[in-house]
Image (spheres, helix red, strand yellow):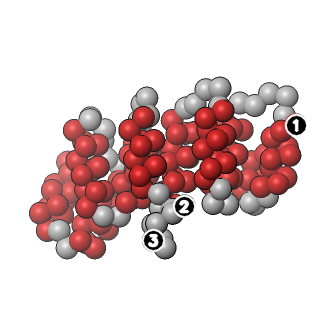
Amino acid sequence: MLSGYVEVGLLEDALKFFNKMPYRDIASWTAMITCYSQKGQMENAARLFEEMPERDIIAWTALIRGYLHNGKGYVGQGDMVNACLLFGKMPQRDETSWNTMISGFQSEESLDLFSMMIKEGFRPDQGTFTSIISICASLASLGWGRMVHACVIKA
């Protein structure tokens, strides 16, 4: 029921349902963080994240995604500072969390993140390559483009 309210963006109904739940699992907490993020209410999303009794990679990534899509900077830019701080605090990362950061930046920082991802032993997937190739093209970065092409061939 909660995920249904979140999917259609009914924050008030989702919050009422969440507050009445006798037991809240990680999925319900993460659903509310996602709902707040979709509505641009990052302070509430962060508050809820801090109140969570336990967090998993999905919850961490949901809040990072929220920061990347809801910024205080220029139009269309996310809150990169908070996204980076949160990413740095993650106790463990996966390909999805790396891809979220890489696609969220859409700049040279994405290329640095891609390099760090590989150095930390993560294997880029189709989503990673799609984002990186697009970024290389927008930056007209032939050197990075060649390196990414070599990685795609190896994968």
Q: To which quarter of the image does residue 136 belong?
A: bottom left
The answer for how far apart the CA atoms under marks 2 and 3 are is: 10 Å
Q: Which numbered dot is residue 74?
A: 3
Q: Dot 1, how many residues are within 10 Å of its Cα: few (below 14), some (14-19), or many (20+)?
A: few
Q: Are marks 2 and 1 in contact (CB under 8 Å)?
A: no
Identify which residue is drawn at 80% across, 49% down: 14
Q: Secondary structure at mark 3?
A: loop
How crowded pointer 2 is (Cα within 10 Å; few <14, some 14-19, many 20+) is rated as many
Q: Quadrant of residue 95?
A: top left
- Lateral position of residue 5 relative to residue 144, left or right: right
Three-letter code for the amino acid on which mark 2 is drawn: Asn
Q: Which residue is mark 2?
A: 70
In the shown orientation, is residue 123 left or right of residue 149?
right
Helix, strand or loop at disc 2?
A: loop
Crowdedness of circle 3 by 10 Å Cα count: few (<14), some, many (20+)? Answer: few
Q: Residue at x 61, y 26 (%)?
A: 54
Query: Looking at the image, which residue is at 51% across and 54% down?
Result: 67
Expressed as whole percent of the image width and height from the top left, the position of residue 105 reads 37, 60
Give the number of the disc on residue 90: none
Q: Is residue 64 above or below residue 137?
A: above
- Regarding residue 152, the answer to whether it shows in the image is no
Question: Closer to us: mark 2 or mark 3?
Answer: 3
Q: CA distance from mark 2 to mark 1?
A: 28 Å
Pick whichever of labels 2 and 1 is earlier in the sequence.
1
| Residue linked to disc 1 | 20
Front position among marks 2 and 1: 2
Badge 3 amino acid: Tyr
Nearest the eye: 59 or 143 = 59
Tell which of 94 and 79 is nearer to you.
Answer: 79
Percent position (x, y) of residue 73? 46, 66
